[in-house]
Image (tube, grey):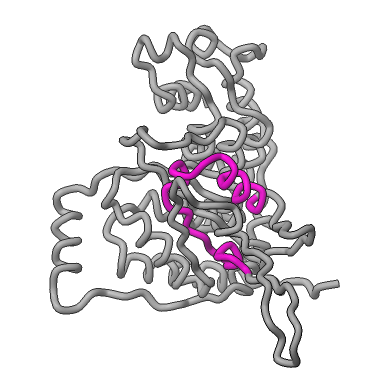
């Protein structure tokens, strides 16, 4: 059996978190909420879907975090002709030094710690399913043989929300496998001015590694130790059950505008995310404030508005805000 991951002290955890934030800020301008959400997902071993228009530094965000955390990083550009073997790997017939031939497995880019799946909706469902299976099972099967993926294993997938031609949208059931859906917006004028100052001169800031894979796994283990009081658990259950239009707790707004509410995986994700965010913020226990902070990235891809919502211009963000108003 593998030896247990050593538990860091509380002071050591807070020091590591502060160093991660400091190094991230050296490269990434603004996007404080986005960075916090990405770190929360990393501590929860959760995969993320990043949604934003081109040019918002999605790739830079993920690669910078990979470098800071000392993880092996791979970027996969998803295209309509990408096949499952292009990301998983394949058996290749090779000649041995002693003569003769044999099939040897050549691993694909999926064999890394942190994967950036760029424009996941650009590739057909067969290739999407191969990636999502690896995300769920933490293993791949090629030529009848199952191979485990190295821990930690995390996937950050990106989507461009303004282009729909030639895309293959992820089904709702597959979207549910993502821990967070994180939305990126344009920077403020002051932030964009800082971006110009940092990126158009002679020198460009670079982040340094402050952790390694084993240290990150120790932090992930520390998250589980953060207590969640009973009243916080009850608030999470109330939140998810109120989102279900056929449930007893749903009000008229939810019944009128929601087709499908959040399932049990949302409740699990809210508990885990509240714990991780409390750790990032140096709190001794998860609170309602952490639940409110992680509700949008947990719920926005798990609540499906109906046709009434479309007709009345009611967005999923407005539905989540309505639900949070009753916490």
Residue 247, percent from left and from top: 66, 14
Instruction: Report x, y in % for residue 257.
Output: 48, 12
User: Could you tell me which residue is drawn at 49 percent across and 37 percent down?
Assistant: 292
- The image position of residue 208, as x and y in percent, is 40, 78
State the residue in front, 196 or 40.
196
Magenta span contains residue 118: yes
Which image quadrant: the N terminus?
bottom right
Query: Residue at coordinates 19% horizontally, 78% vertically from top-left?
Result: 203
Q: Residue lying farthest bottom? A: 98
Q: Is residue 289 visible?
A: no
Part of the protein shown in magenta: 107-135
- Residue 26, position in %: x, y? 30, 70
Please say if 111 is above or below 326.
Answer: below
Q: Going 48% across and 27% down the picture, which residue do you hit?
A: 324
Quadrant of residue 89 within the rendered picture? bottom right
Question: Measuring 55% from the left and 52% from the top, which residue is drawn there?
Answer: 83
The question of residue 172 being in magenta is answered with: no
In this view, 211 is above or below 191: below
100 in relation to 326, above or below? below
């Amino acid at each position: 059996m593998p030896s247990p991951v050593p538990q860091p002290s509380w002071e050591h955890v807070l020091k590591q978190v502060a160093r991660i934030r400091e190094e991230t800020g050296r490269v990434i301008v603004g996007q404080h909420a986005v960075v916090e959400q990405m770190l929360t997902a990393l501590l929860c071993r959760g995969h993320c879907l990043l949604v934003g228009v081109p040019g918002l530094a999605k790739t830079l965000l993920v690669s910078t975090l990979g470098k800071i955390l000392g993880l092996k990083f791979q970027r996969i550009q998803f295209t309509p002709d990408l096949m499952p073997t292009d990301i998983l790997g394949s058996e290749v017939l090779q000649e041995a030094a002693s003569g003769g031939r044999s099939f040897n497995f050549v691993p694909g880019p999926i064999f890394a710690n942190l994967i950036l799946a760029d424009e996941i909706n650009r590739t057909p469902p067969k290739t999407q399913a191969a990636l999502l299976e690896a995300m769920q099972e933490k293993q791949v099967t090629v030529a009848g043989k199952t191979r485990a993926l190295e821990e930690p294993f995390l996937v950050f997938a990106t989507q461009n929300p303004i282009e729909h031609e030639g895309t293959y949208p992820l089904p709702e059931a597959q979207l549910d496998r993502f821990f967070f859906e994180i939305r990126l917006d344009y920077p403020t004028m002051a932030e964009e001015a800082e971006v110009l100052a940092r990126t158009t001169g002679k020198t460009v800031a670079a982040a340094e590694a402050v952790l390694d894979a084993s240290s990150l796994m120790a932090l992930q283990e520390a998250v589980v130790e953060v207590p969640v009081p009973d009243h916080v658990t009850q608030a999470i259950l109330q939140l998810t059950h109120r989102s279900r239009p056929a449930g007893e707790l749903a009000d008229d707004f939810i019944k009128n505008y929601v087709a499908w509410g959040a399932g049990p995986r949302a409740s699990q994700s809210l508990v885990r995310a509240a714990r991780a965010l409390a750790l990032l913020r140096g709190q001794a226990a998860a609170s309602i404030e952490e639940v409110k902070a992680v509700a949008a990235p947990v719920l926005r891809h798990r609540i499906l508005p109906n046709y009434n919502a479309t007709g009345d211009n009611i967005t999923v963000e407005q539905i989540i805000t309505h639900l949070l108003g009753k916490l």
